[in-house]
Image: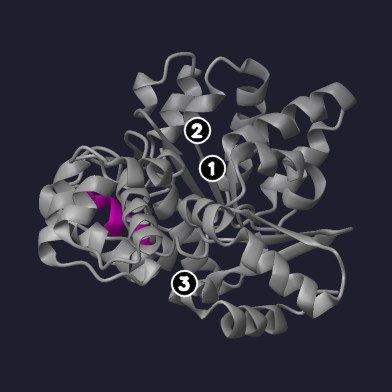
Amino acid sequence: MVHWNELMESLRSTRPELVRSWFQHLRLTSMDGGLVEVAAPNAAQARYLETHCKSAFTEAAQAVTGRLVSVTFAGPKSTAAASDTAYGDAARPGRRTSLNPSFTLDRFVKGPCNQLAYSAAVAVAERPGEVYNPFFVYGAGGLGKTHLLQGIVHAAAARFGDGRCLYLPSGAFVDDAIRALENGREREVREHYGAVGLLAVDDAHLLAGRERSQEEFFHILNLLLAPHRQIILAADRSPPEIAGLQERLASRFSAGLVVALDTPCLETRMAIVRDKATVLAIHLTEEIVRLVAERYDADVRQLADALVRIDELSAFESSPITVELAKRAIGLHRVTSATKATQDHAIP
């Protein structure tokens, strides 16, 4: 059995140079045979750990357990992973699926591009089922839709208890619907989902073209909306723009508040960079913050990945983070042969 505190203490004593402040958010999720799985708050941190810390964590785990074990790292559960367990356990009221501990409303960086969506999300979390129901948020990938949805679930669960708050990707629901139709268990699935007090469904556009799944989802919407339970949805397009979505479903999605997330302006992106740097426990000058924010202007996730690149190169070269180093890390300068190997293994 791996004792997490002992493992971290061993790592701090033997490899202190590797330890970052955000390691406090790591969690031991499973130990299956000789494989120990550690969960990171996001995919970028998981990749960093896998690339630079795997051997150190493995040695610490072996020292603590006295066994020949190996450590692997994982980010938040993907849609595919979540759908494997969605039917039954994950779909039962009270089980929250794939929540990222960092995706809280107080950690959501606000700006002109998302202020309306954020304010509405706060109102929904404070008074679920009473305002903006359904609440539908849409926009391109990487603008914060999942963060908002999960933030509402986190906040509502903290205020009212998590026993009836459920977040899931739409793929998990589609899998449930397919299994139910194949096994004649439609009523059971409707009862599972219809019993929750707040249901947040991500990537709702993936329901398009799936007639039977849309039929089931329409019934569940009716079950929840009648007693004023909260529905929250996210998609890459507004309901009328989702081709292959039943007209009655698009109408239901649009019946509450539909709000767009726009591409963040430079000032908002700079605020996001500062926030991500705090999570990674790295110090950046304002010049470097602006450099990164100007380099990536469409997908917020690219900002976090860029910071991990910079941190990796700084650690590899044992050098402070300067403007020149940051430029090389994010591809604004021609890389030298000494750093190319590092960037080849950095986040794409």
Element type where label 2 sits in the image: helix
Image coordinates for residue 24, horizontal then vertical, percent: 53, 76
Image coordinates for residue 344, horizontal then vertical, percent: 42, 38
Q: Is the residue marked by circle 2 packed among few (<14), some (14-19), or many (20+) residues within 10 Å?
A: many
Residue 242, visible in the rendered structure: yes
**On the picture, is 209 further left or further right than 110?**
right
* In the rendered image, the vertical position of residue 155 relative to residue 224, given as above or below: below
Q: Is the residue marked by circle 1 packed among few (<14), some (14-19), or many (20+) residues within 10 Å?
A: many
Q: Residue at x 81, y 30 (%)?
A: 180
For discs 3 and 2, the disc positioned in front in the rendered view: 3
Residue 94, visible in the rendered structure: no
* In the rendered image, the vertical position of residue 287 relative to residue 305, given as above or below: below
Cβ atoms under marks 1 and 2 closer than 8 Å: yes
Q: Nearer the viewer, residue 133 or 268?
A: 268
- Label 1, label 2: how many angstroms apart (C-alpha)? 6 Å
Q: Nearer the viewer, residue 189 or 237?
A: 237
Q: Say what amino acid the circle numbered 3 marks.
A: Trp
The residue to which callout 1 is attached is 201
| Part of the protein shown in magenta | 114-123
Name the N-terminal-most of marks 3 and 2. Answer: 3
Q: Say what amino acid the circle numbered 1 marks.
A: Val
The residue to which callout 2 is attached is 204
Q: How is the image coloured?
A: one colour
Q: Is residue 52 magenta?
A: no
* In the rendered image, the vertical position of residue 185 relative to residue 343, given as above or below: above
